[in-house]
Image: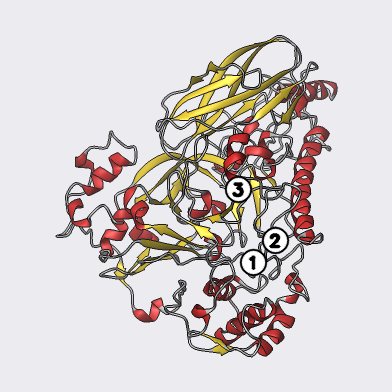
Amino acid sequence: MKSRGRNDDEKTRRKIEAMVEAEERYLAQLRREGLDSGAAPLRTTDRRSFLAVAAASAGGLLPRIASANAAAGAVERAVPADPTKVQGTPTNDDGGYGSRSQFESEARWRFGTPTKESSWTMTPLEHGMGVITPSGLHFERHHGGIATIDPAKHTLLVHGMVEQPKKYSMADIRRFPSFSRTMFIECSGNGLTEWSKPTLKTVQGTHGLTSTSEWTGVPLALVLRESGVKPGAKWVLAEGADAAVMTRSIPLDKCLDDAFIAYGQNGEAIRPEQGYPIRLMLPGWEGNTHIKWLRRLEVSDVPYQTREETSKYTDLMANGIARQFTFVMEAKSVITFPSGEMKLPGAGFYEVTGLAWSGRGKITRVEVSSDGGKSWADAHIQGPVLPICHARFRLPWRWDGKPAVLQSRATDETGYVQPTLKQLTDVRGLNGPIGSIYHLNAIQSWGVAADGSVTNVHA
Amino acid sequence: MCTLELGRWLAFSACALLVAAGCATQRSADVPQAASPGGRLDLGTTVTAAELANYFSYPADGRGLPPGSGSYAQGEKVYQTKCIACHGDKLQGSPLGDRLIGGRGTLVNNSPAKAPVKTIESYWPYATTVFDYVKRAMPFNAPGSLSNDEAYAVVAYILGEANIVAKNEVINASTLPKVAMPNRDGFVSPDPRPDAP
């Protein structure tokens, strides 16, 4: 059947092309604004000096810069030639909620799906610092847009195989004993474009579907105990209050172990796009299971076989059999500096840095190679290293100016070592251009050319 | 499967949970000791069957499926009105909506040059999932707006076009769970990972 799958091939190709285009639009915008990441790591300094020059030439206060409206999350203010000679912005002039510098413009970009409601955005990991992702840069995946919910009217239902079905207002939920946990969430589709060949150019494109926040909420076990789970129960269906009415079946064991219901993110209420007012949290498991806008938990003896756990979020192997309920995000790491689309100005000292994480616990080791994996050096991991959380690693590196291939390799506390792409595809096969789609946690390679330019390569 | 018997959790469970969750500095004194027998905090309110009737989820055995029914012919009319814009006149899909039929025999494949064609016909293991999803989230521009009859009918139409059920068969709460989907045995669990290296 020569024509078999032609439509689907085209759809897959369109999908990948749309993603490439979305990344390209973002890069073009950066170039227009003089923020070409080719100048990284000094790019913001470059823009600042450009603006300083412009300000000086304007002979004092600089009015709004015509070519650069304030970036999302920033307020454009006049820039004095000498900030010591004029008073600054009045206190609390921001209305009581601060914004970032107008000179900072990194942003999520959206994958170019035909609808904006079923789509996703990527975290700009290449500009990240430390381990926390700013709430406004946390990646998103929506299936029916971002629900707008009045917390005064929101309720959480708990029913099914329980002694006492219950309903909780947000005020009720806030009365439970609470705790905070800093942890990553990663979409299991992170990197899906990279199975068969290097496709996206930046680390935002290849790895931007992972983010870390401090989440605050209530242990799910405490909530379930209020209702009393009946013997024989094994699964809990979680349902969201968005237009997709997203549902996933979660094993009860996980619900009674470390699952929780979050209402806080990085010290404030969870963001609308992260599930305001509450979201299910399942540490270490694929992002789709962290049901946003959580409104209902139904305890059951069987999984519900929802659309998202059958037709999506299953991993089709080369033999035609799909793995189902593949929840855990395995250990993974990526170098964020230097990374794709950057340009090193010349030979000499650089600090290689990046992130490592594992859904099975703590990262215990990160190794870095500059020769495509032939030799490795242990990177320093910034402490404290938290379980199921991004860990920041760093390694001093003196680049000799010759072509190099940078890689990082993570090991977690179970002893699991991040595999190569070949090791993954040897086992799982390559079922189409985007392979088995989910759970690509292979070692990432960045090629450094003699001119200092950094590109996404398979090595 | 439930390895933790809830009764064991009584007085120290909240504390244990917090420690397990990485808050080792949390002292037990921080945790309310005012739990009633059974360790319950007596929060929340009871919920009635009437309230619960507003929600649904249908597992593969079909429990809880609502009354109503639909035929291929009725479903074709619903499809032409409410589904065709995104899923196409031949259920072939478009950039806006997934392809719904075809693709049998394409799942075994180890070539990056070809893509498997994953549709309801070729990939979905349970027909109950189609009904659940259509009723839950379709059509995209008016999610959750189909009546039970309309949703059953659309499922009958799709399954008929997919040559999975006869076009004269009526789909309802009794017949839907009995539909034998072609890829019913195409899934494995539990998760075999770690599988590499």
Q: How is the image coloured?
A: secondary structure
In depth, the one of B151 and A143 nearer the eye is B151
Would you identify the image quadrant in which residue B77 lies? Answer: bottom right
Describe the element under mark 3 as helix, strand or loop. Answer: loop
Neighbourhood count class around disc 2 (C-alpha, 10 Å): few under 14, some 14–19, many 20 upward: many
Q: Which residue is mark 2?
A: B117
Tell me the subunit letter for badge 1. Answer: B
SS category of the residue bearing label 1:
loop
Residue A189 marker = 3
Q: What whole-number distance in Å separates the C-alpha atoms at marks 3 and 1? A: 21 Å
Q: Is any atom of residue A175 visible in this view?
A: no
* Residue under the image location 74 percent in, 32 percent down: A78
In-image side of B133 versus A62 (left or right): left
Mark 2 or mark 1: name the one nearer the start of the chain: 2
Whole-percent x and y of residue A283? 43, 45
The residue that label 1 is drawn on is B122
Q: Amino acid at mark 1?
A: Ser
The chain to which mark 3 is attached is A
Q: Which mark is residue A104?
A: none
Q: Secondary structure at mark 2?
A: loop
Mark 3 residue crowding within 10 angstroms, few (<14) / some (14–19) / many (20+): some
Mark 2 vs mark 3: give the one in front.
2
Query: Residue furthest toward the left?
Result: B37
